[in-house]
Image (tube, helix red, strand yellow):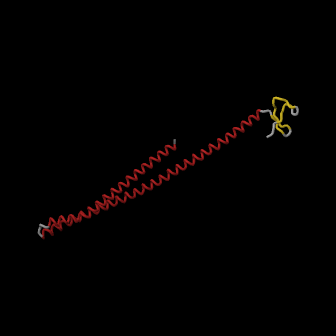
């Protein structure tokens, strides 16, 4: 009964660990894709903004163009700073996910060894217990035979007749009286 409970608990733990591992891998893949997309967008954004500004400024006079360009440089640099900050945060999140995934893999490894150790111990206990049960059953059977023999011997009327064992039986023998020598093996 306990072995079934241990097996079912082991199977449940293994299934949970497998699901967690798959979820972690899936989240890591999605996280990498999002990071790559954001990096491409961040790298393309200043060029797109400059191109849009160049198109818009083409129609404005030279002085106005200079003034607008100087005014756009500050917002563009702010956008670039924010994009770099977001990229740094995404990298930190990716690093944290990698650390968590490594810890989870270590936990799975330790759990696996723990379950293997428990099962090995249970198997050893079952084998040793089975052997000892069989051995003592044999010893008890032998002791029962010997006890029956001693009980029968104690109930019989026996004695030594010279160097032989004699038993009292229902008929008389002239040499030893009521006792008859027992046949030797």
- Please tell me which residue lies in front, 114 or 80: 114
Q: Is residue 36 visible?
A: yes
Q: Residue placed farthest to the bottom in the image?
A: 62
Measuring 49% from the left and 53% from the top, which residue is drawn there? 113
With respect to residue 38, does 115 lie above or below?
above
Q: Residue placed farthest to the top in the image?
A: 170
Task: Report whether 55 appears left or right of 142.
Answer: left
- Please tell me which residue lies in front, 47 or 166: 166
Measuring 37% from the left and 57% from the top, which residue is drawn there? 97
Image coordinates of residue 111 in percent, x first then y, are 47, 52
Measuring 12% from the left and 67% from the top, which residue is drawn there? 60
User: Residue 144 lies in what quarter of the image?
Assistant: top right
Q: Is residue 81 visible?
A: no
Task: Report whether 177 appears left or right of 156.
Answer: right
With respect to residue 109, does 175 lie above or below?
above
Quadrant of the snapshot with the C terminus? top right
Task: Report whether 44 appears left or right of 102.
Answer: left
Task: Report whether 148 appears left or right of 134.
Answer: right
With respect to residue 1, does 32 lie above or below?
below
């Amino acid at each position: 009964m306990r072995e079934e409970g241990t097996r079912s608990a082991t199977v449940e733990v293994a299934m949970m660990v497998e699901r967690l591992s798959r979820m972690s891998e899936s989240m890591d893949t999605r996280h990498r894709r999002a990071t790559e997309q954001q990096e491409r967008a961040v790298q393309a954004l200043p060029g797109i903004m400059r191109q849009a500004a160049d198109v818009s400024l083409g129609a404005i006079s030279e002085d106005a163009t200079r003034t607008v360009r100087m005014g756009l440089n500050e917002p563009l640099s702010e956008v670039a700073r924010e994009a770099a900050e977001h990229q740094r945060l995404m990298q930190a999140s990716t690093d944290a996910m990698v650390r968590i995934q490594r810890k989870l893999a270590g936990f799975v490894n330790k759990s696996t060894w723990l379950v293997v150790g428990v099962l090995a111990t249970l198997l050893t206990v079952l084998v040793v217990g089975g052997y000892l049960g069989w051995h003592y059953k044999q010893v008890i059977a032998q002791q029962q035979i010997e006890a029956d023999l001693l009980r029968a011997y104690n109930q019989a009327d026996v004695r030594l007749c010279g160097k032989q064992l004699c038993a009292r039986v229902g008929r008389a023998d002239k040499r030893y009286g009521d006792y008859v020598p027992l046949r030797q093996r």
